[in-house]
Image (tube, rainbow, N blue to C red):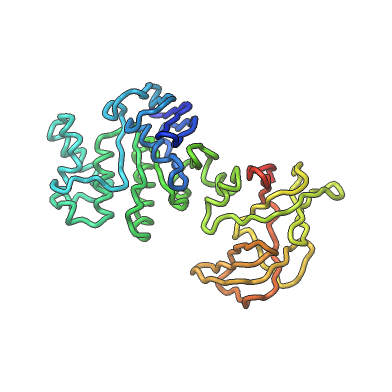
């Protein structure tokens, strides 16, 4: 068992609080992603789990064992760094088995375990090459192989794909997902790329200013963000936000925005001014007015390939809408936007926190 329990972690650098009273439980065999913008504390948290950062306060348990004060080599972890960190003067095979040699593992076991890791990552044919003879993707595979050959209880990855081009990142995401399915090692993965997080994680812990603001499944994070920050950080393009007012008429809840009245599902107990969150793909464009559709005007239409991204003006607000490739509308044209009521999310206009299960 390699579950991880983080309890009230705190880490400061002078007056800067990198981690603020952070607590998190990571399940055995889970792929958990720490996601957030630069400087939010995600890498510091990962390094604290690895034993590379000493905490000001808090406890770290791995598999029920308190490792808070243990050095990295005694924690049962392996780490893959953003910069690959492969030895340039060693062949691929020697890079992979380096850790095994340091632990005096017999040569036959080294060969067998290196071959198993190489087969998983499809790099067996590269054993005799040096890192300078490899592509970025191949070097990253070597770094991953060197980590998994140690058979760690916990695998830590710090933005391992950030140095790769877009097409190679897409391929490596699939490889890492397959690898985790076969190894079932508890994995903690740091990234600022929300597409990576959504595609890889069993759960995503979204961080901001040293704190976890939401930890849930990718579907929950995307569809029901806990705050405006989460909704605006997750998604490409991110969630749209508009100002509206919730009113109850004839026993039903409506949110009034831009001159339209959008019905809300039953159970919306909030009333008064709110921030409305709606994803671009949950908005339909119409060319005739309706009491339940928000009037807008076309600003820009951007072909993306499988869809087009429509930028529209709603009063003083700008809103993004996903429309079909065949959609046509000239800039300045009057349109009406119909929001899917089941997908409208309500948030407090002052704090940004979700205020109702809509």
Whole-percent x and y of residue 103?
18, 29
- Residue placed farthest to the front in the image? 15
| Direction from residue 68 to residue 71 in the image, left or right | left
Q: Relative to 41, is 219 on the left or the right?
A: right
Which residue is at the front of the view, 149 or 268?
268
- Whole-percent x, y for residue 187 in the image: 38, 38
| Residue at x 34%, y 44% (from the top left corner) | 179
Q: Residue at x 45, y 50 (%)?
A: 199
Measuring from the top left, give residue 121's x and y in whole percent: 27, 48
| Image position of 80 with respect to 254: above or below | above
Name the residue located 45 percent from the left edge and 32 percent from the top edge. 27
Total marks shown come to: 0
Q: Quadrant of the N terminus?
A: top left
Asked whether, in this view, residue 286 is left or right of residue 224, the answer is right
Is residue 326 left or right of 84 when viewed as pictured? Answer: right
- Image location (x, y in percent) of residue 310: 59, 68
**Which one is nearer the viewer's eye here, 284 or 89?**
89
Closest to the observer: 5 or 246?
Answer: 246
Question: Which of the 4 quarters of the picture holds residue 59?
Answer: top left
| Residue furthest bottom in the image | 330
Q: Is residue 264 above or below residue 330?
A: above
């Amino acid at each position: 068992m390699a579950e991880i329990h983080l309890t009230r972690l705190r880490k400061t650098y002078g007056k800067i609080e990198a981690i603020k009273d952070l607590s998190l439980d990571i399940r055995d065999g889970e792929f958990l992603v720490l996601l957030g913008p630069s400087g939010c504390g995600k890498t510091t948290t990962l390094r604290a789990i690895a034993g590379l950062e000493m905490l000001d306060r808090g406890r770290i348990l791995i598999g029920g064992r308190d490792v808070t004060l243990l050095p990295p080599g005694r924690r049962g972890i392996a780490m893959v760094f953003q910069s690959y960190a492969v030895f340039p003067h060693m062949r691929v095979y020697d890079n992979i088995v380096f850790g095994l040699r340091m632990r005096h593992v017999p040569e036959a076991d080294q060969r067998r375990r290196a071959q198993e890791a190489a087969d998983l990552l499809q790099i067996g044919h590269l054993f005799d090459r040096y890192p300078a003879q490899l592509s970025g993707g191949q070097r990253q595979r070597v770094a991953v192989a060197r980590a998994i050959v140690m058979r760690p209880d916990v695998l830590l990855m710090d933005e391992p794909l950030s140095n790769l081009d877009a097409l190679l990142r897409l391929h490596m995401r699939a490889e890492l997902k397959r690898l985790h399915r076969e190894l079932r090692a508890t994995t903690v993965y740091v990234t600022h790329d929300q597409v990576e997080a959504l595609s890889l994680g069993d759960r995503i812990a979204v961080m901001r200013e040293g704190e976890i603001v939401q930890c849930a499944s990718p579907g929950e994070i995307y569809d029901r963000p806990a705050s405006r920050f989460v909704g605006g950080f997750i998604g490409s393009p991110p969630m749209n936000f508009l100002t509206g007012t919730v009113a109850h008429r004839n026993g039903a809840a409506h949110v009034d925005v831009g001159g339209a009245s959008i019905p809300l599902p039953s159970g919306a107990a909030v009333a008064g001014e709110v921030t409305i969150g709606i994803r671009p793909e949950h908005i339909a464009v119409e060319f005739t007015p309706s009491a339940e559709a928000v009037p807008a005007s076309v600003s820009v239409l951007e072909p993306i390939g499988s869809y087009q991204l429509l930028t529209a003006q709603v009063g003083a607000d700008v809103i993004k809408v996903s429309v079909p490739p065949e959609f046509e509308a000239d800039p300045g044209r009057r349109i009406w936007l119909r929001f899917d009521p089941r997908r409208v999310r309500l948030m407090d206009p002052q704090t940004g926190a979700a205020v109702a299960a809509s």
